[in-house]
């Protein structure tokens, strides 16, 4: 691990061992961190996408550490069957969670997962296999709600599903049933921006983490 300090923020480039390979990531950590946010964006190489984004800036302002990690190697990320292999990506994310719980910089901090795009389903599946101290955000994917809706035995502290406003009527009738699963829905305006740059999306994340 190589660590540099910039403006009271520790930035550590990571090489996390898993099976017969390594996952590469970046841990950005304020000195007085109050939790670790794992960014899950699916199997494509993604750790550089969060760097400098509105999402990262706001999380750091709120004193959260951010772990952005590539669940697949660069070669695997180019392979269709690896990118969409839910079981493989889920296992990789579980390895990341295990690393966070053991690493001396993060082991005493609460863990949250932000699942973006394809990472939402990966994050949901990983949370079902991990301890229930994880706060899971499943974002902007109607298909994810269907998956939660049919898992009657799901037990999570809190699951937040953020959808665009155009989907509101479609799910209005299921709200009462979803409440029994400890799932809350929030609707935000649709946008052409990527989620990590969308103001409404980012502020919804910050509000629900507080």
Image: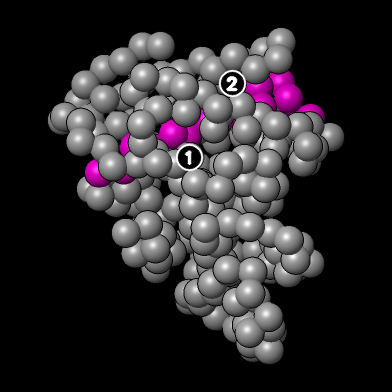
Which residue: 70% across, 31% down? 91
Mark 2 touches mark 1? (CB < 8 Å): no
Which residue: 62% across, 34% down? 93
- Which residue bears the numbered disc 2? 23
Q: Nearer the viewer, mark 2 or mark 1?
A: 1
Q: Is residue 194 above or below residue 94?
A: below
Q: CA distance from mark 2 to mark 1?
A: 14 Å
Crowd around label 1: few <14 · some 14–19 · many ≥20 (10 Å): many
The quadrant where residue 67 appears: top left
Q: Is residue 24 left or right of residue 111?
A: right
Q: Is residue 53 above or below residue 199?
A: above
Q: Which residue in the rendered view is the most extreme toward the left?
A: 7
Which is more N-terminal, label 1 or label 2? Answer: 2
Q: Give the x, y percent position of residue 79.
A: 79, 30
**Element under disc 2:** strand
Task: Using the image as rendered, state which of residue 114 and residue 74 is in the foreground.
Answer: 114
Q: Give the x, y percent position of residue 110.
A: 40, 41
In the image, which residues are magenta?
A: 63-79
- Which residue bears the numbered disc 1? 38
Task: Using the image as rendered, state which of residue 192 and residue 172 is in the foreground.
Answer: 172
Magenta stretch holds residue 32:
no
């Amino acid at each position: 691990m190589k660590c540099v300090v910039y403006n009271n923020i520790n930035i550590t480039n990571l090489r996390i061992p898993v099976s017969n390979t390594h996952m590469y990531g970046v841990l950005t950590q304020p000195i007085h961190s109050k939790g670790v946010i794992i960014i899950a964006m699916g199997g494509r190489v993604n750790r550089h996408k969060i760097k400098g984004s509105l999402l990262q800036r706001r999380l750091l302002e709120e004193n959260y550490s951010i772990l952005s990690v590539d669940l697949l190697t660069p070669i695997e990320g180019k392979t269709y069957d690896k990118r969409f292999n839910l079981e493989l990506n889920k296992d990789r994310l579980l390895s990341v969670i295990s690393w966070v719980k053991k690493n001396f910089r993060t082991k005493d901090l609460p863990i949250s997962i932000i699942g973006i795009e394809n990472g939402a389903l990966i994050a949901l599946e990983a949370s079902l296999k991990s301890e229930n101290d994880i706060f899971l955000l499943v974002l902007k994917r109607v298909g994810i709600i269907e998956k939660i809706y049919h898992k009657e035995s799901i037990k999570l502290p809190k699951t937040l599903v953020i959808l665009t406003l155009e989907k509101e009527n479609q799910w209005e009738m299921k709200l009462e049933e979803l409440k029994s699963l400890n799932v809350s829905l929030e609707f935000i305006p649709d946008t052409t921006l990527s989620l990590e740059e969308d103001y409404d999306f980012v502020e919804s994340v910050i509000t629900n983490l507080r």
